[in-house]
Each structure stands twice: as structure tokens, then as C-alpha cells.
Image (cartoon, grey):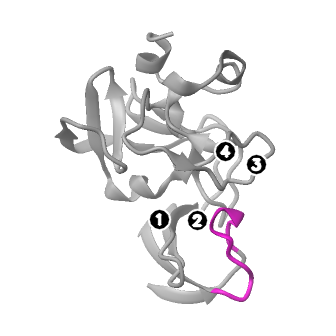
Amino acid sequence: MEKATENASKYYSFNSERIVLKEEVTPFAEIWKCPQSGAQSLHAKILFKPGDIISSIGARNYVKKPNYLSVQVGEERHILLDPVFLQYINHSCDPNTHFDTVNMQVVCLKEIGVGEQMTFFYPSTEWSMAQSFDCLCDSVNCLKTIQGAKHLPSEVLEKYQFSNHILNRF
């Protein structure tokens, strides 16, 4: 990992004076890690446009019970992501990617600039999450508590793109 001083995402409350460790994982992305907090995130090394396929999604393992690293890909199917670096695409209530669990691809929803963090809306794939959490994304649309699509009011559902296995439950 190479040390660099950078402005980083508000999600981790970094400031421009903190050191961020960077690790290239593909020619198009790198993992940023804050040594002070341990927070990690995936950032673009190239420009992505809406509709671009960022990566294929594979399953390095299937899990019987969901956990904080698993992604729901079917009504009763949860996987651990392959490639592993995809697990560093963190949640945002204003996401710039979508996990397409039919075509098993990460798709760009809106332009992602070089150095920008890749994010997705966790309830778009998760019906009821194993661990809910307080969201710190700081977006105007922040839902504050993230616990899965099952717990979202109908007016929120209209604002996001969801996986088919989630849409089938509504």
C-alpha cells in the first residue's frame, strides 16, 4: 500500500490532513484505507459513465445465513463476493452503482470520477439485513438507519433501483 495525503469521502469523516493508504486492486479501482479508523472503501481509477459495467460479480462462496459481507442474490441465496474487492463498495443512500443480481454485474448509475468512492444502496439487494446500522453517508436522502428493503416505506421504494428478488417481494 502506498501512503498519500488526499481528501477522502465524508462517509469516514476524513479530513485533508489524514493519511490514506491506497492499494490498487485492478487497473480501474483501488481500496482506500484510513489507518486511524480502519475504514476501507473502493475508489475509481478511471472515469465511469452511467450504464458502464464496472465488474462482473461472482460467488466465492454461498452462505446459509446472511452476514455483513454477504450479498443477497436470490430470495434465499446469499454470496460472498468474487472478486473480493467488491466488498469494499460501501453503502450510500445516494448510490453511484447498482448490483445487478440477474446479470451478476456491478453497473454504474451515475458518473463516477477518478478518485471517487463507489457506493451502492444496500437495501437494493437485501430484504432484511443480518446487521442493521446507522448510516453516515450524509446525503440529502439519507435514511439514517439501514436494515433492508422490507423496512422501507413505499415513498422511499420509488427512488431506487432494486434487484428482481427484492421487487418480487413487493
Q: Which secondary structure class fits the magenta region best? A: loop
Name the foreground residue: 64 vs 151. 151
Q: CA distance from mark 1 to mark 2?
A: 7 Å
Among the two numbered marks 1 and 3 on one chain, the one whose residue lies closer to the N terminus: 1
Among the two numbered marks 1 and 2 on one chain, the one whose residue lies closer to the N terminus: 1
What residue sits right under mark 4 in the picture? 144
Q: CA distance from mark 1 to mark 3?
A: 29 Å
Mark 1 Cα shell of 10 Å, populated few (<14), some (14-19), many (≥20): few
Residue 112 position in % (x across, y down): 68, 52
Mark 2 Cα shell of 10 Å, populated few (<14), some (14-19), many (≥20): some
At 44% from the left edge and 32% from the top edge, which residue is drawn?
126
Q: Over which residues does the magenta segment extend?
A: 8-18
Label 2 amino acid? Lys
Whether pointer 1 and pointer 2 mark residues with C-beta atoms closer than 8 Å, the reply is: yes
Quadrant showing the N terminus: bottom left
The image shows residue 143, relative to residue 116, as above or below, that is above
The image shows residue 17, relative to residue 96, as above or below, that is below
What residue sits right under mark 2 in the picture? 45
For marks 4 and 1, give the one nearer the viewer: 4
Among the two numbered marks 2 and 4 on one chain, the one whose residue lies closer to the N terminus: 2
Asked whether residue 96 appears in the rendered view, the answer is no
Label 1 amino acid? Pro
Name the foreground residue: 65 vs 112. 65
For marks 1 and 3, give the one nearer the viewer: 3
Q: Which circle marks residue 27 in the picture?
A: 1
Q: CA distance from mark 4 to mark 1?
A: 34 Å
Asked whether residue 60 appears in the rendered view, the answer is yes
For marks 2 and 4, give the one nearer the viewer: 4
Q: Which circle marks residue 139 in the picture?
A: 3
